[in-house]
Amino acid sequence: MNIASEPIGLSRFCWVSSILLLALMCFFQVLNFLEFADMDFRIYYDASIALRSGKDIFAAWNPDSPLTYIYPPLLAILFIPLTFLPLEVAAALWTVISMSLLFACLWVGAREVMARFDGRIDVATLPVIILIATLLSLPRIKSEIDQGQVDYLILFGIIGSLALLRRHPFLAGVVLGLVANIKYQTIIFIPLIVVRGWWSTLLGFLLGSIGVALSGAFVIGWDLNLDYLRDSLSSIVLLFGGEVPADEGPLVYPLEWVESVSLSSTCARWANSVGWEVRGAYLMIGLSSLICFVIGWSIYLCHGLSLFRGRWGASGRTSARFQGLIALEWTGLLVAVLAFAPQTKMRHMAILVLLMILVAQFLVVKRDPVPRWPILLAAVVFMMSMVLPLETVSEGFVMGARETWRANGGVVFPLLLLLFVALWTGCAWTRHSVDRSDAEAR
C-alpha cells in the first residue's frame, strides 16, 4: 500500500462528494423552479419589477401571499437584471448563483478558520472539513434554495470581511457596510469593532453603508431612494413591536410570531402567555442576552484568555495569539443574529455554515489535550433539535409537537449550547497554542 497516496485519495473523495452533493441539489432545484417559482424569490423579483415600472416596492404583488419586500432598495436594484427573464428562469438562474456563493463560503471560510487556528491547510484536511460542514448544513441548504432566498449572499460578505480583517481592515468594514444594505444583520458587528478600537474598519463600515445606501439614487432617483430607505428602516421598528401602517410601508409580523424560533420571539410568547406587557418581553430578552454574554466571558476566563485586556487596536487584530478568538467572536455574533433577531425562521439557520466549519475543524483535527467528544455531542443534540419531533400531517396549521417545541426554544437553546461548546473548544485550542508559543520563545 502506498501510504503517500492515501491523503490524495481522501482529498479527491471529499472534493467529489461535496461538489456532487451541491451540484445535485442545485440541479433538482433548478428543475423545480423551471416548473414553479412562486416562492420567497418572487418577493425580490416583484420588488425589482416594481422599481422598473415606477410602483411601490413594498406593495404586495403576489395575490397568493401577503408577504412583501421589507429590505433596503439595494437588493431590489441588484435583482433588476433578473427581471428581464421570466420568473421561472430567473429563479433557476438565482439558484445557480446562490449555490456558487455557498461553495465560495465553504472554501473561503474553511481556509480562514484553519489559518486562524494555526492549522495546516494540507491536501486532505481542507476538503474533509468542507465535506463535513456541508453534511451538517445539508437540511438548511435545501430549505434555503427551495425558497430562492439570499442568505448566502449575506454570508459571503460576512465571511469575506473576516478574511479581509487582518490585512485589509478598511475593506473588511466596507464589505460589512455593503451587506448591511441588503439585510441589516451586519450591524451587530459594530459593537465588537468599537470595543476593539478598529477605527479603520468602523470608517469602512460607515462609508460603505452610507455610500451604498445613497448610490441607489443613481438608479431610482434621490427622493425615491430616500423614501425607500426610510420605509425599510421602519420595518425594524415594526419588528420590535411598533404599529403596522394601515396602507403603506412594509408588512412585517409581530415579535411573537409563532413561526419565529428566535429567543426574542420565544420570550415575547412567554410574556404574552403570563399576561406581561411588551416591557416584560424586553426584560426577558435583555436578561437572556446578559446571561449569554456572562457565559461566554466565563469561558474565556476559565482558559486564562482575555476578552478585553490587551486586545485594543491593531495589535488585537493582527496578533497571532488572537486570530482564533476573532474567528470565534465573528461566529458568535452570527449566531447572536439568529438567536436574538425579532424574526428567525428555520431556513435562516442556513447561515450557520461558519459555525459548522468550526465544528468540522474541531472534530477532524486532533489537538491534545482538548477532547473532541463534547463538540460531537453538542452537534448531535443541535441536529436532532432541528428535525425532532417528527412533523405531524394536518390539513390546516395546528400547534403540534414540532411547532410547540420550536415555539418554546427547542431549537435556539441547543444552538446556543453548540456555540458555547465550540467556544470552549476553540478557547482550549487557543490556550494550547499560546502556551506552546511561549514555551518555544523561552
Image: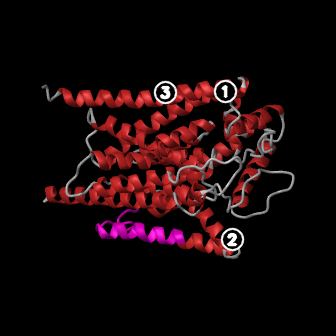
For mark 3, what is the residue? 24
For mark 2, what is the residue? 272
Classify residue 288 as left or right of residue 37: left
SS at mark 1 in the image: helix
Classify residue 379 as left or right of residue 201: left
- In front of the other: 215 or 353: 353
**Residue 206 at what x, y percent from top left?**
59, 52
Magenta: main secondary structure: helix
Query: Closer to the camera: disc 1 or disc 3?
Result: 3
| Label 1 – label 2 distance at C-alpha | 42 Å
Is residue 180 shown above or below 130? below
Residue at 37%, 49% (x, y): give it: 358
Mark 3: which amino acid?
A: Leu
SS at mark 2 in the image: helix
Whether label 1 touches label 2, CB < 8 Å: no
**Callout 1: few (<14), some (14-19), or many (20+) C-alpha neighbours within 10 Å?**
many
Q: Is residue 168 magenta?
A: no
| Label 1 – label 3 distance at C-alpha | 19 Å
Q: Residue furthest right?
A: 247
**Residue 259 at what x, y percent from top left?**
64, 54
Q: Is residue 302 magenta?
A: yes
Q: Confirm whether residue 97 shows in the render.
A: yes
Q: Quadrant of the C terminus?
A: bottom left
For mark 1, what is the residue? 90
Is residue 218 shown above or below 310? above
Mark 1: which amino acid?
A: Ala
| Label 2 – label 3 distance at C-alpha | 44 Å
Q: Magenta stretch: give its range.
A: 288-312
